Every structure is written in C-alpha cells, then in structure tokens.
C-alpha cells in the first residue's frame, strides 16, 4: 500500500476490525474534554486569603480509570461535571487508556498517569473515579469544600453487588452521616486530591492495595479523610483476588479481559431522561452529554490523537 493510509474497510479485511473506532460506545473510544482555563480566582471568596499563587485556581481534572462503564455510571458523572461547572469551578474530564493485560496489573499505572496529567495541566484538584462508582451531582463540590489534601467520599456497595460480602472498605469501619473522619486506609474507588500531593508520590506509590497507598501517603505526613456525609455507591464490590483459587482467578481474569475488549461502553442517558424538559442532550449515537457543548468539543485534551472515525473516514470525535 506504500504511504497510503488504509481505509477502515481495508483494516477490517486485514483482521483489525475490532480496533476501528466507529462509534462513541466502542471500547477504544475515550472521552476527553479540557476547557480553556476559567476565572477561578474570582470564585475563591474568603479562601483567597490563604491560597498561594496557582496557575488555575478552583480547577479540577476528573480522571476516570479506564472507560469500561458499569450501569448508570456515565450519566451520573456527566451530571456531576455539569453541577460542578455551574458552581463556578473549571472542570475537565479525561478517561485514562486502559493499559491492562490482565485487569489488576495496570491500575497503578493508570492512576499514576492521572496524577501526571493533573500536574502537567496545572489543575488545583484531581478527582480519580472508578467506572463502577455512582456519584451524585454534588459529590465533587462537597468534597472540595473541605479543602483537604486528600479526601474520599464514603463508598457503600449496593445490596447484592458485593463480590465478597462483609469485607471492609476502610479501617476503621465507618458509619454514614458522622462527618469527616480520618482513616488508616479506605477503598480507592473515588478520591479527591490537591495536586500538590502528587509531588511527593512516585509512580510506585500507586501500585498495590489500598493500605499500601495509604502507607505511602503517611510517610509524607498525609492522612486520608473520608466524608461520611458524601456517599458514593458502588455497582460492584472491590476485587479481592488473593482469596480465590487459581482456577477461579484465571477464569475471572479471562472474562474481565474479554469484556473490556469487546463490550459496548454504557454511555446512555438517565433512565427517566426527557430531552424536552431536562438539561442535557443525547447525541445521534445514543451518548448522553449533560452539557450540549461538550459533545462538540470532542477530544481536545492531551489524548487528542484518539478520535472516533465513522466508516467513511469522517471524524466524529
């Protein structure tokens, strides 16, 4: 073919069909939207008294660890981003490319990438979110109001969704509705950081289990706080692979790997969404966007090389 770039049809003929991004629900499509820096200084209020100079006050990068959305996750994220922006924050979204060969092996790399993206982008805050976490529209704002270096919402597994019932999600175990509580460790399904934290953590800190990460924070004098008044429900409980037999572990890894490679991404609207009365829009491909402009922004962040292609070669990103 020489220097000619193959067409999507030619790629399919070569056996690469599943790698062609032809829709926004494709496994290889990653959402990325980085707006121009806003007027964060004007929204600081009394907090301006003690803030040191910053490139972009009141800005937050929301980084989703992969794009394998569980049911009701995407539209909840969209509504949270809209609410946060309407509150006065500068909001950006990035879904980190899933680099796992096996499900657990690259989560640390993906989180380390998220930290670097937030630092390089000059954001004040970084909110890392797993795709099985069901946020409320005010989740992020409620966490940022605490103005803590590290704060998590309280994770609660939905009834019947815990893969290992009875397993702890933090130490000590917490009750809902008792305010901000310090913990030794907590599940990493949703985490808010002031990005300055990342300057003291190397890439290794993100590898390993929840307690290992908490240890790394503690070595630099930082403690995790959990806001028990801000609950995030999980569509499935955290994996605990060491308690499985090898044949069970291998089978679950194989199933998870295949689903990540092939499943459509669940990016639909809320179940009761009515475009005539509700904020937001549903694109032609069925993807829900809480703000109409966001779908037109396309992929304009640092991952901008990943754009959806229609079968005729026209860009849809």
Image (spheres, rainbow, N blue to C red):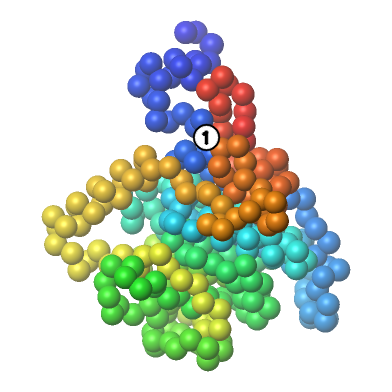
Farthest right residue in view: 42
Q: Position of residue 273 (x, y in %)?
A: 60, 55
Which residue position holds label 1?
23
Disc 1 crowd, CA 10 A, few/some/many (<14, 14-19, 20+):
many
Left/right placement of residue 267 relative to residue 160 reads right
Q: Is residue 310 visible?
A: yes
Q: Residue drawn at (51%, 77%), measured in percent from left and top? A: 231
Q: Is residue 225 above or below residue 94?
A: below
Q: Residue drawn at (54%, 11%), measured in percent from left and top? A: 4
Q: Residue drawn at (37%, 39%), measured in percent from left and top? A: 262
Q: Residue drawn at (22%, 66%), measured in percent from left and top? A: 242
Front one among 115 and 40: 40
Q: Position of residue 201 (x, y in %)?
A: 51, 66
Front one among 157 and 153: 157
Q: Position of residue 255 (x, y in %)?
A: 26, 48
Q: Position of residue 39 (x, y in %)?
A: 83, 61
Q: In terms of image quadrants, where is residue 146?
A: bottom right
């Amino acid at each position: 073919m020489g220097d000619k770039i193959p067409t999507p049809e030619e790629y399919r003929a070569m056996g690469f069909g599943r790698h062609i991004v032809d829709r926004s629900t494709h496994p290889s499509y990653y959402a990325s939207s980085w707006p121009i820096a806003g007027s964060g200084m004007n929204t600081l209020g009394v907090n301006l008294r003690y803030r040191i100079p910053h490139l972009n006050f009141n800005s937050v990068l929301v980084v989703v660890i992969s794009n394998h959305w569980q049911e009701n996750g995407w539209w909840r994220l969209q509504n949270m981003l809209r609410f946060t922006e309407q509150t006065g924050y500068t909001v950006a979204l990035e879904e980190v490319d899933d680099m796992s060969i096996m499900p657990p092996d690259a989560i640390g790399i993906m989180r380390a990438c998220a930290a670097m993206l937030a630092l390089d982008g000059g954001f004040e805050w970084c909110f890392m979110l797993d795709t099985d976490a069901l946020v409320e529209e005010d989740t992020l704002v409620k966490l940022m109001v605490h103005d803590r270096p590290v704060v998590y919402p309280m994770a609660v597994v939905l009834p019947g969704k815990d893969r290992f019932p009875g397993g702890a999600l933090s130490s000590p175990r917490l009750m809902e509705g008792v305010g901000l509580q310090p913990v030794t460790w907590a599940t990493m399904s949703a985490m808010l950081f002031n990005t300055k934290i990342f300057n003291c953590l190397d890439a290794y800190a993100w590898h390993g289990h929840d307690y290992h990460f908490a240890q790394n924070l503690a070595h630099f004098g930082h403690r995790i706080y959990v806001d028990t008044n801000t609950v995030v429900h999980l569509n499935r409980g955290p994996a605990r692979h060491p308690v499985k037999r090898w044949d069970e572990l291998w089978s679950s890894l194989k199933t998870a790997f295949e689903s990540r490679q092939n499943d459509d991404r669940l990016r639909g609207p809320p179940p009761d969404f009515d475009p005539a009365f509700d904020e937001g829009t549903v694109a032609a491909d069925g993807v829900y966007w809480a703000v109409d402009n966001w779908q037109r922004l396309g992929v304009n962040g640092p991952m901008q090389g990943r754009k959806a292609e229609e079968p005729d070669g026209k860009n849809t990103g």
